[in-house]
């Protein structure tokens, strides 16, 4: 399994009656409870087909075996996407997980569908995360009390506008500048592959198409941040063969406004508070 790490959540329970008192004959004690958790990123370093067909099954199977081996161990797994996946693909394994949940050995935490970006997401987007998760819990026919568990908040959030790079990096995966989240970082516009000249419309993500192993087509997500309409031009590194509007699952949809393709750019009308996704083929 790819670099799967079993993380631990350490919860310190203080003896409040003795806290802050001077040391006498009373000995202050602390208890540490350790809860197992498997951190899997469904759409970050791994492709979804790897997670869906291999990683979730192997992780959950290993956890069930570990729970059998250590009766005192408790496990907490976040995000309802994983439960919905095994319910559909591995129903026998899903029943074993439900059995552990009913026996209070396995807790469902997170309250959200996946680990969403919480730096640039709109309030409506975050609310949908909770609605989708709770609806899935209902389908599981489980009386689940989920806590909010936010473990990937704002680590790599960034925006680029008119040559100014704004970052909200809390920590990085490899040797990042510890002060890179302070101040403004600029670079020449001619060095940018994609650009929007706007003070309130941003490119929030650029990625390859889901399950694609080529760099063409690319997925570009654009966000309006201040509740204003505007005619937008997106500068491209090459001439585009086609620009197709998609939903967040990267399925083609009818464009919400006319898309005009020109030399090394495409333009459209962006509505207020919109989040729009485009598939660009070069």
Image (cartoon, helix red, strand yellow):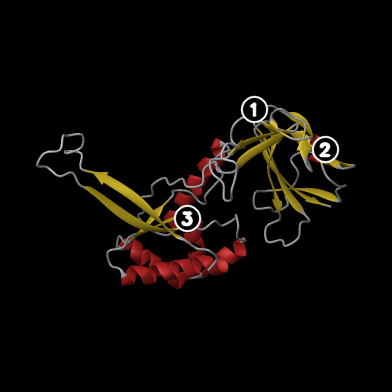
Which residue corresponds to the image point at 51% horizontal and 58% vertical from the top-left? 40
Which residue corresponds to the image point at 44% horizontal and 70% vertical from the top-left? 61
Mark 3: secondary structure: helix
Q: Mark 1 points at which residue?
A: 226
Left or right of 90? Residue 76 is left
The image's mark for residue 258 is none
Where, by quadrant of the figure, is residue 156 drawn? top right
Q: Give the foreground label among 2 and 3.
A: 2
Which residue corresponds to the image point at 76% horizontal and 56% vertical from the top-left? 215
Q: Name the residue under label 3.
A: 80
Mark 1: secondary structure: loop
Left or right of 217? Residue 250 is left
Q: Name the residue under label 2.
A: 190
Q: Residue furthest left?
A: 25
The percent coordinates of residue 245 (x first, y second) are: 74, 47
Compare marks 3 and 1 and give the one earlier in the sequence.
Answer: 3
Q: In this view, does 43 lie above or below 257?
A: below
Q: In this view, does 198 lie above or below 109?
A: above
């Amino acid at each position: 399994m790819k670099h799967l790490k079993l993380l631990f959540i350490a919860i310190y329970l203080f003896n409040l009656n003795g806290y802050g008192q001077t040391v006498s004959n009373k000995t202050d004690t602390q208890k540490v409870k350790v809860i197992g958790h498997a951190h899997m990123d469904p759409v970050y370093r791994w492709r979804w087909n790897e997670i869906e067909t291999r990683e979730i099954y192997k992780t959950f199977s290993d956890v069930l075996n570990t729970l059998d081996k250590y009766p005192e161990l408790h496990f907490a797994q976040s995000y309802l996407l994983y439960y919905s996946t095994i319910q559909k693909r591995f129903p026998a394994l899903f029943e074993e997980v439900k059995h552990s949940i009913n026996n209070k050995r396995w807790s469902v935490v997170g309250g959200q569908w996946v680990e969403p970006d919480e730096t640039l997401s709109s309030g409506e987007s975050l609310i949908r995360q909770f609605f989708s998760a709770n609806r899935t819990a209902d389908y599981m026919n489980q009386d689940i009390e989920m806590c909010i568990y936010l473990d990937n908040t704002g680590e790599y959030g960034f925006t680029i506008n008119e040559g100014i790079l704004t970052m909200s990096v809390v920590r990085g995966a490899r040797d990042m500048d510890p002060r890179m989240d302070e101040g403004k970082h600029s670079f020449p516009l001619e060095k940018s592959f994609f650009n929007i000249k706007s003070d309130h419309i941003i490119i929030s993500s650029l990625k390859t198409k889901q399950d694609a192993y080529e760099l063409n087509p690319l997925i570009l997500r654009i966000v309006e941040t201040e509740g204003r309409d505007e005619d937008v031009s997106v500068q491209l590194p090459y001439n585009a063969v086609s620009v197709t509007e998609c939903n967040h699952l990267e399925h083609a949809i009818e464009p919400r406004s006319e898309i005009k393709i020109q030399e090394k750019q495409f333009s459209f009308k962006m509505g207020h508070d919109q989040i729009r996704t485009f598939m660009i083929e070069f």
